[in-house]
Structure formats: structure tokens, C-alpha cells
Amino acid sequence: MQHIQTQEEWEVEMSLKILEYVKNEIYLDLRFMSAALSVLTPKSDKAVHTFATDGSFLCFSTEQMLRVFKQNSKYLDRLYLHTILHCLFSHLWIMPGKIDSGEYRRFWHLACDIAVEYLIDSMNKPCTKRILSGLRVKTYEMLKQEKGSISAAKIYRSLWEMPEREIIALELEFHTDDHRYWPKKTDSEAKQQIASENQKKWEKIARQTQMEQE
């Protein structure tokens, strides 16, 4: 008897097709990202409302995927690239300091989001181009005044000097993907082993991507 596709199965199928479309859009503008774009295994996840990754899977919300694709497909391009760049820069695995909770984790996640969004906006590519808000322009100008390259670690240090109201404003502006599956220092030994393997994998891909770009 022929299987009758359920609504949920249809939504997953359509979401996977949209994801392939998104990857192709990015590839056309950023061909050196070819290897990185094919690493994460897509997985529907009802617990998330946007993209999330642990370095192995790309967890997505079918509801968001279908809704946003109709309204603004370019946002999905930015969202996917944002998540991939977190992996390429090892943001998931290199949180500074020994404490992995509270403000330390909060500020690190925000710093990573700002760093990645700054890079995407600096690329100024058709697939991810957007109008910058006043807060983004102000934040980027502040970052450019700092000596040396702009990194999540440098942004992280500067966040400790900001008042709470500015931190909240930055979180509202730069929050993009869900970091709930990023490894934690309190994870079990088995999870830490998987995280270590994922980090090594992405470090290799990052070197390959850098070579392709050059």
C-alpha cells in the first residue's frame, strides 16, 4: 500500500528543499565556502525556533523555514551563513575562561553573534545584503576603532564594560541563531569527546576554506 505523506513529513521535505536552495544561493556568492556548506546534517527539531547546531547537525524549525522563505528568503541565507561561521571560527568550543555559565556564557554568545554579523555585513554580498540599523552602524564604527582584527574574544572583553541596557539592546539586535546545543564544560565525558572531534573537523574545514578564499 502506498504511503500517504503526513503534513509533518511534507513540511520536513519542503524545508530540506529550501535549505538546499539557501546553500546554493550562498555558494554562488561565496564559492570558497563550498566545503563548509555541506558539513552539517539537517535535522528537524521542534525544540528550536530558528537554526541551532552542535557542530554535527543543523537543527531547524520547519515552521520558521516555511514562513520566512515566503516572507524574506534572504534572511535564511544570512541565518545559515551565520551558523556556519560560528563553526568555522570554533565559537562553539573556545569560550574563554574556566566558568561556563551566567554572564560569562551570555557575553560570549553575544560577542560571537556580533563578530559573525559584522563579518557578514562587511562581505556586502547580494545573498546576505541588508539595510543596517543605526545600532549596527554605531557598533561597527566602535569596533573599527579598536586596534587589530575584530574577533569575538575582543568583543567579549569590551562587553564587560557596558551597562545592562546596552547589553540588552545588542542582544535584541544581533541575536540570530539558537546556541542551546553548543558544548558546555559541564557536559559528560562522552559529549566532550564528540565536541572535541567536531572541533578538529571544523578546524580542518576552516583551513581548507581559507586556502580556497586565497
Image (cartoon, rainbow, N blue to C red):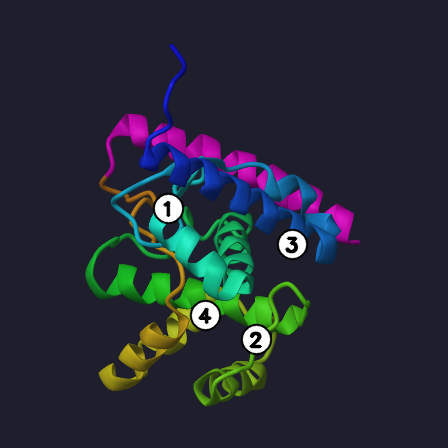
Identity of the residue drawn at 60% across and 66% down? 128
Q: Which mark is residue 130?
A: 2
Residue for badge 3: 26
Residues at marks 4 and 2, CA–CA distance in whole angstroms: 15 Å
Identity of the residue drawn at 59% across and 72% down? 121
**In terms of sequence position, does the residue under pointer 2 or pointer 1 come before the other?**
1
Q: Which residues are magenta?
A: 187-214
Q: Nearer the viewer, mark 4 or mark 2?
A: 2
The answer to whether 205 is drawn above or below residue 173 in the figure is above
**In terms of sequence position, does the residue under pointer 4 or pointer 1 come before the other?**
1
Give the image quarter of residue 95. Answer: bottom left
Residue 166 in magenta?
no
Pick out the residue farthest to the right.
Answer: 214
Q: Nearer the viewer, residue 86 or 129?
A: 129
**In terms of sequence position, does the residue under pointer 4 or pointer 2 come before the other?**
4
> Badge 4, how many Cα within 10 Å: few under 14, some, many 20+?
many
Pick out the residue farthest to the top.
Answer: 1
> Badge 2, how many Cα within 10 Å: few under 14, some, many 20+?
some
Q: Secondary structure at mark 1?
A: helix
Residue kind at label 1, given as amino acid type: Thr
Q: Secondary structure at mark 4?
A: helix
Residue kind at label 2, given as amino acid type: Arg
Residue for badge 4: 114
Quarter that holds the N terminus: top left
